[in-house]
Image (cartoon, rainbow, N blue to C red):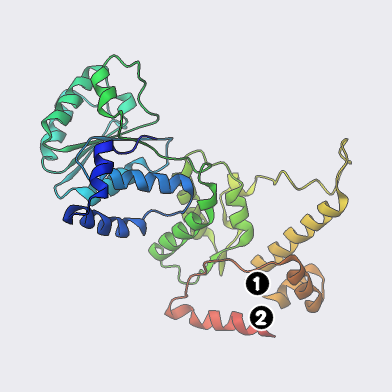
């Protein structure tokens, strides 16, 4: 990943009112960029360097990784004028549209989405817009620019200011935090104060799924699950079919023919047992009395199994709204029985 130029790094080491202002803005920025993985923190460091100048920037990455989000964050961190986004998603961008957008973005930031789909005859115009400096030019593309592009000036424009945005797979350790972030966001928008969190099994399914559109697909899946959830948790059964239909590769079929290569029977039975316990707990809102009845177990036996397997309710549980307090207290009382 290319970040800031050497001059920017030198500038960053010198204490100044501008640097302090940027640091303060980035403190706020840090609360908006979800995740602590090395991959996403590298993007934050790149933003920090780019915020110290008005240099053009390119965010490159697969669909749904958040390229436009980071472009907006860069604008809010470093600019005071308008933000204008020009996209060729619905119709190809022509010269008139590009110039009109540039005029509207004077003093602010012009975001050109889909640079890799831009007509080659407009490449020189982009270079000219950037050289005039009337608006900061920020572009997005599916990949860094090919050095063999006919317009060498365009390649040079982003040579030291291309930020590669990681895929969801590359930042897999951020999945639980991202899931919780989107849960809180969409549960609040939907006024679902009755929902307390996402069940461990649902999170496990989300972590094991390959999302075609990365973070965008993850957010959409959680939004849909909230609409179907009966509560008090978003469970595996609430997730879209393409996610809940995926079978864990580590769980052998307990009913059927023995695999040719054999299997670890103890491990298979242990995993099956754990999954059934989790399903019973999430279906009953972690009410151990009801869960034990679903499983045909004594409550004491179930409690001992939960302790042995170190199972726990969903993490990052939301605080219930005022009208959900009674249900919360009832659930706590049931678990204390």
- The crowding category of the residue bearing disc 2, from other C-alpha atoms within 10 Å (few below 14, some 14 to 19, many at least 20), is few
The x and y percentages for residue 259 are: 86, 38
Q: Which residue is mark 1?
A: 286
Q: Please, what secondary structure does the residue beneath circle 1 have?
A: loop
Disc 1: CA contacts within 10 A as few (<14), some (14-19) or many (>=20): many
Q: Quadrant of the C terminus?
A: bottom right
Location of residue 216 in the rendering, given as x and y in whole percent from the top left corner: 44, 45
**Residue at x 54%, y 79% (from the top left corner):** 328
The answer to which image quadrant residue 273 occupies is bottom right
Q: Nearer the viewer, residue 129 or 94?
A: 129
Label 2, label 1: how far apart the Cα atoms are:
8 Å
- Residue 185 in percent (x, y) is at 41, 60
Residue located beneath label 2 in the image? 335
> Residue shown at 26%/57% (left/top)?
25
The image quadrant of residue 190 is bottom left
Q: Is residue 59 left or right of residue 11?
A: right
Q: Would residue 296 be found to the left or right of residue 333 on screen?
A: right
**Which residue is at a point 36% across and 40% down the rendered structure image?**
67
Residue occupying the point 57% across, 57% down: 238
Whether tag 2 and tag 1 are in contact, CB under 8 A, the answer is: yes
């Amino acid at each position: 990943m290319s970040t800031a130029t050497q001059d920017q790094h030198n500038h960053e080491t010198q204490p100044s009112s501008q640097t302090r202002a940027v640091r303060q803005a980035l403190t706020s920025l840090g609360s908006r960029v979800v995740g602590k993985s090395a991959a996403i923190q590298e993007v934050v460091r790149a933003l920090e360097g780019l915020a110290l100048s008005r240099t053009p920037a390119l965010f490159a990455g697969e669909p749904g990784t958040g390229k436009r989000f980071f472009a907006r964050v860069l604008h809010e961190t470093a600019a005071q004028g308008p933000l204008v986004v020009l996209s060729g998603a619905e119709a190809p961008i022509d010269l008139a549209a590009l110039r009109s957008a540039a005029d509207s973005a004077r003093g602010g930031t012009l975001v050109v989405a889909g640079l890799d789909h831009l007509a080659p005859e407009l490449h020189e115009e982009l270079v000219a817009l950037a050289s005039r400096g009337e608006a900061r030019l920020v572009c997005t593309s599916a990949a860094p620019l090919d050095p063999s592009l006919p317009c060498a000036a365009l390649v040079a424009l982003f040579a030291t200011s291309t930020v590669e945005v990681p895929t969801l797979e590359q930042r897999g350790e951020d999945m639980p935090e991202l899931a919780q972030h989107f849960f809180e966001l969409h549960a609040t928008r939907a006024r679902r104060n009755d929902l307390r969190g996402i069940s461990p099994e649902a999170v496990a399914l989300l972590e094991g799924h390959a999302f075609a559109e990365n973070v965008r697909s993850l957010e959409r899946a959680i939004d849909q699950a909230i609409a179907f959830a009966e509560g008090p948790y978003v469970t595996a059964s609430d997730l879209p079919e393409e996610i809940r239909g995926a079978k864990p590769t580590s769980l052998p079929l307990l009913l059927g023919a023995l695999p040719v290569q054999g299997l670890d029977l103890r491990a298979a039975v242990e995993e099956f047992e754990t999954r059934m316990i989790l399903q019973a707990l999430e279906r009953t809102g972690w009410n151990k009395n009801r869960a034990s009845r679903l499983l045909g177990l004594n409550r004491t036996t179930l409690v001992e199994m939960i302790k042995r397997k170190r199972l726990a309710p969903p993490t990052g549980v939301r605080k219930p709204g005022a009208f959900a307090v009674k249900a919360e207290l009832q659930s706590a009382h049931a678990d204390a029985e």
